[in-house]
Each structure stands twice: as C-alpha cells, then as structure tokens.
Amino acid sequence: MSSDNKALTASEIPLALFSLGLPLTLAAFSLSGYTTPSNLAEIFATGLAILGLILEMLRGDKSVAPLWFKAGIPALLITWISFTHFSGFTQSLLDYLPLFMEAKPLLFLLISVLWLKLFPPPEPKQISFWSSWLASLIIAEFILRFFLLHEPAMPSLSGMSSISGPILLVGLCATLHNSEENTFTRLIILAGIFCTLGRDITLAAILIMLISGPKGALKKILLVLCLLFFNYLSLQVQEMTFMNRQDLPSYWLWFSILELFANNPELLLTGFPLTAPLPLNVPASLWTIWHGQQQVWTGSGIYLFHIPPFWLHLLSSWGLGGPCIVAAAVTAVYRRFPSSMLASLLTTVIVCGFFSPLFYHPACALVLFPAFISATSPEVQSFRFE
C-alpha cells in the first residue's frame, strides 16, 4: 500500500469513529446493562484530538514501528489517564463552564482542521461508506425489534436520532456527488433514515432528494409515499401523538424561550447571559426525560448549554445576530462553491438544526465539518449539479 493510500485511510478515522465506533460502543453499553458514560462522545473527541497532536509531533518520523503502536496506544493511555485521574483538577474551572461549552463548535472545528492538515479531506464516497454502516445498524435494529415486539419501535441502541440522523444525512448528501455510481449506498442510507422514525430527519432527506437528487417523477412519488408511511409508523410508536416523547424537552424549550423573547424583546439583540441560568423551571412531567438527556436534575438551573436545538441555542446565546451571521456565511460559501452536495448539506443544517445540536455535539460536528470541506474541494466542484 502506498503512502497516499495510507494518508487517505487515515483521513477517514473521524468518520469511522463517530459513524460506526461510537454507535457500536453505545450499543455495547446498552446490551451489557452497564450505564453509558454521559460524556462518551466527548471522550472520543478528546482521544481524536490527542491522536492528531501525537501524529503532528511524529511527522517526519522514519521509524518502522506501525502507526497504531507509535500514536494509537499513547493516545488511548493519555485519554484514559486524563478522564480518570485529572478530572478533579478541573473543579476550579467550573465557573467558566458556560464559556467553554459555548466554544465547543470552535474546538471541534480546530480538531477537524488539525486532521485536514495531517491528511487530505475525505472523499464523498468515504463519507457515504461510513454513514451506510450506521444506516445498516439502524435497519438491523428496526427489523429485530419489529420481529420481537410485532410492532414498529424506534431504534435506540445506536444513540438518539437527533445525533445519528445528521450523520446519516451527511452520508446521503455525499452520495449526490457522482450520483449514478452511488445508487445502492444511497438506498441503504435512505432506508436507515426512514427506520429512525425521526420526522425532521425524514423531512430533510426528502427535501434533499426532491431538490438535488436524481430526476424522475416516479422516484419522487415513491419517496413521498415512503415519507407518509414511515411518518404513520412514527405516530404509532408515539401512541398517535405528533410529539416524540424524547423531543418533548426541546418543544418545551422552544415555546418557553420564545415566550421569554416576546416578554423581553431587547434580548433579541444580545441574547441571554452565558454565565447566568435562564429564568425557567422544567415542568415536573419532564423531569425524568430531562435528567436522562442532560444527566442533571432541574435544581442546578437551566443554562444555555442545556439547550440542544442548534438554531434555538444560537438565538438564545447571540440574539438575532447569531443566525444572521451563520446565514450570511453559508450564503457566501455556497455562492463560492455551488454544488448539489453543498446545497444538500445546507438543507441538513437548516432542517435538523431545529431539534439537533449539530455543531455543538462532537459526533455531528466532527462529521459535518469534514463533509463541508469535502464539498468545497475541486473534485466535487467538477460535478456541479449533475
């Protein structure tokens, strides 16, 4: 294998880690009965950053020792020691926690840039390959639950759909590059998206396929019929209610924070203070769900980093200026690098941002950032709107 091939394989590590490694680890914890660490994704991201820094220090090293031995084992040891022995030293930084949490997208961008500095950007086929593995896991769980329970059930072993959904959609977007060669992979990913039974995710997938997907009236009609069918299944899972139980805290946050803005319109200019809790109290009916998602009880206060939906988080933290700056930035990028893959990635962010944390979650961010960079590469630009 040539060095180019090795570099190309190494560039897939973040994709493989969060598209397959993290879901498999979550499933292993769930099936074994052990409690899943609430910061598991952050542990993976830390390990990825440490591995990247070690590889940067080893650049130019001519020793014959394999890469996993020179960099992989030290990265694992440093990550393990950091989270098991050094966490007590961070207690003095708790007052600055809201600021650190708000800087998470920048941190994840820096990790992505570090990897792209070491290795070439992942190709679209690599992105869709790893997303198709995640889709296969979700499809298998959906089928297994159906045969065991004799009714549809929402897959959960691979994580929440608000996290796995954007990763699947990124893979779907990648199949639109040179789309005629990616039909089978696209079908697998679409099936995985439908099997999540997440309505926002399926809506984003349908919009992507209708706007940027392969042409043909019959294909589009079949997609809409699939959307209706799986939306009906999701209603069955939710006892014929329109609100997914796991999304209830997000619905409540949307309505409550918009009410706060309505009563205090000046906050639309500045957003809420980062270091102060919001003047909200979680309803008693949501306490259990809230604790399951946030790993804290309501008595500790609700801070901005407790707001998962990307757009609501951005609006609450930075006021109207946050969404406007993001909109201006993505418009400028799209006008500079127009392609069907980039257009569909932007659709993913727009739709999924209403319920998913996106760039504030390591698994989503460390797949989305490389995908956006890949979508601006000359190779993808040569296939504009096939």
Image: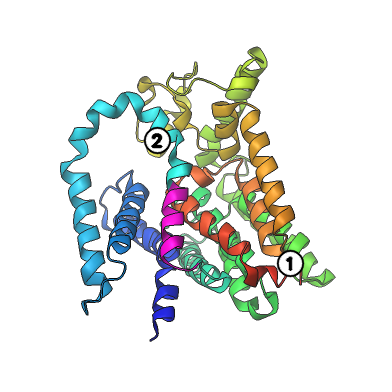
Residue at 66% from the left image edge and 44% from the top image edge: 329
Q: Which amino acid is tagged 1?
A: Gly
Against 135, is 94 above or below? above
Q: Which amino acid is tagged 2?
A: Gln
**Residue 171 horizontal/vertical position (percent):** 57, 64
Q: Are marks 2 and 1 in contact (CB under 8 Å)?
A: no
For the C terminus, give its image quadrant. bottom right
Asked if one can make out residue 209 in the rendered structure from this viewpoint, the answer is yes
**Outermost residue, bottom side:** 1
Q: Earlier in the sequence, mark 2 or mark 1?
A: 1
Q: Pointer 2: what residue?
A: 294
Against 151, is 312 above or below? above
Q: Pointer 1: what residue?
A: 213
The numbered disc on residue 325 is: none
- Assign a secondary structure to mark 1: loop
Q: Quadrant of residue 74?
A: bottom left
Which span of residues is magenta-colored?
A: 108-120
Decide if residue 385 is on the left or right side of residue 89: right
Badge 2 local density, few (<14 within 10 Å), some, or many (20+)? some
Residue at 61% from the left image edge and 26% from the top image edge: 319
**Residue 349 horizontal/vertical position (percent):** 62, 48
**Residue 161 horizontal/vertical position (percent):** 51, 51
